[in-house]
Image (cartoon, rainbow, N blue to C red):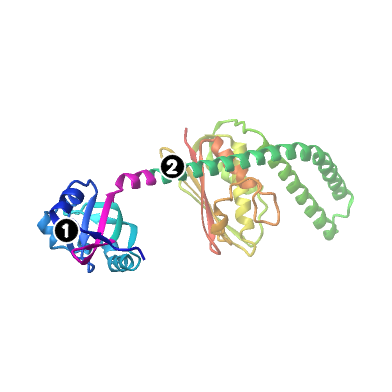
Amino acid sequence: MTERVPLIATDDKIRALIFDHASDMIVLHHLDGRIFDANKSLCETLGYSYDELRDMNAVDIVSPEHSLRISEVFDEIVRIGELIFESVYVCKDGTRLPVEISARMVELSGNDFILSVGRNIAQRKQEQQALQQHASRLAAEVEQSRERLSHNEKLVTIGQLATSVSHELRNPLGVLNNSIHYLSMILNQEDNRSGKHLRIMKREIEECRRIVDDLLDFSREPVLQLEEVNLPSLIDAALEKVEWPEHIRVRKVFGAEQISVKVDSQRVVQILVNLISNAIQAMPHGGTLSISMECNRKGATIRIQDSGVGIEPKVMSRIFEPLFTTKSKGIGLGLALSKRLIDAHHGKISVDSIPQQGSTFTVWFPLS
């Protein structure tokens, strides 16, 4: 325990030498918190007269959240002799002032007091806050740079993979497709089992071709062939390209039958096929797929809503990342490619989802 410091000087000398000439806020407390004396700096800073302060307690000049700990703090000072801590003074007009207080036990005329010297640390707090904000911005920039680097590395990998895979697979896939076509011609048309398996093989070959095409598309900058087209007709074209399971119901709600937009029609159909296929895969046990469309002066909005399994919140932020997938089939390029093509049209895509209830993908294209 720190030894008490005796204040031997007379009251007038204390005020002249310690209190009134100090720029710091000095206050002398009884051990129960009552204010025994205060210097000019404390009076002027808090806006109280000397007589007003003499009638107050330590809890009266600190913020409510700090006043609850005053007795604790005073007990600690009495126990160990001195303590440095931060608090908040509250001025007469309600202004809050962060302070650093250095307090210690002192002896005056044979009586024990607590001498507190407070220093205004508002500027220090502002600098600390600015430093923390700057550090947070730097951390965010570092994270963004890391994500961009990771994204660019993925693009390089996809480009290399696309070139290699397309070269190695296109010819074998073409041979297989021709062979299936030949077999379908020479096999007995009444052999339903053979026909069924040939159709399955043809469908899987088309899936392999789609993956190769997605790899090639994603590895290159999109080049759009823009033309004025009717958006509802593109939706119908996309619906015709999709193979529909029997247990999926389709509901179309179009705000108008004729909505002209200037887009690359082939790319938009590709986007819609990807989104519709995702919706179908999200409903393995059946459900309803709703496609709605509306238009205003700025653009056209398409919503594709399913009643499927939904998307878990923990993966929601990653669904448009290339090569990210939670499915057993596919390589995670469909949504990433769709977003890239929509961005190339200066459009927008967003998703809302509730696990076990379904998802809604919203695509917006500008009219001009």
- What amino acid is found at the position of numbered circle 2 in the picture? His
Q: Identify which residue, 73 or 309, lies in the foreground.
A: 73
The circle on residue 134 is: 2
The kind of residue on which mark 1 rests is Asp
Residue, x 31% and y 55% (percent of image)? 102
Farthest residue to the left: give it: 51
Q: Which residues are magenta?
A: 105-129
Q: As rendered, which of 134 and 114 lies closer to the eye?
A: 114
Image spot of residue 208 (x, y percent): 75, 47
Q: Considering depth in this image, is 111 or 193 the residue closer to the camera?
A: 111
Disc 1/disc 2 C-alpha distance (Å): 42 Å
The N terminus lies in which quarter of the figure? bottom left
246 on left or right of 189 = left
SS of the residue at dot 1? strand
Q: Position of residue 265 (x, y in %)?
A: 59, 37
Q: Is residue 33 magenta?
A: no
Residue 220: % across, % down: 66, 34
Residue 148 lies left or right of residue 203; in this view the side is left
Measuring from the top left, give residue 304's x and y in whole percent: 54, 51
Q: Residue at x 33, y 67 (%)?
A: 76
Q: Residue at x 27, y 53 (%)?
A: 118
- Mark identifier at residue 259: none
Left or right: 174 in relation to 232: right
Residue highlighted by disc 1: 37
Q: Is residue 44 visible?
A: no
Q: Is residue 246 above or below residue 319?
A: below
Residue sitting at x 80%, y 57% = 196
Pick the residue in front: 219 or 232. Answer: 219
Give the quadrant of residue 218: top right
Q: Secondary structure at mark 2?
A: helix
Q: Check residue 120 for magenta coloring.
A: yes
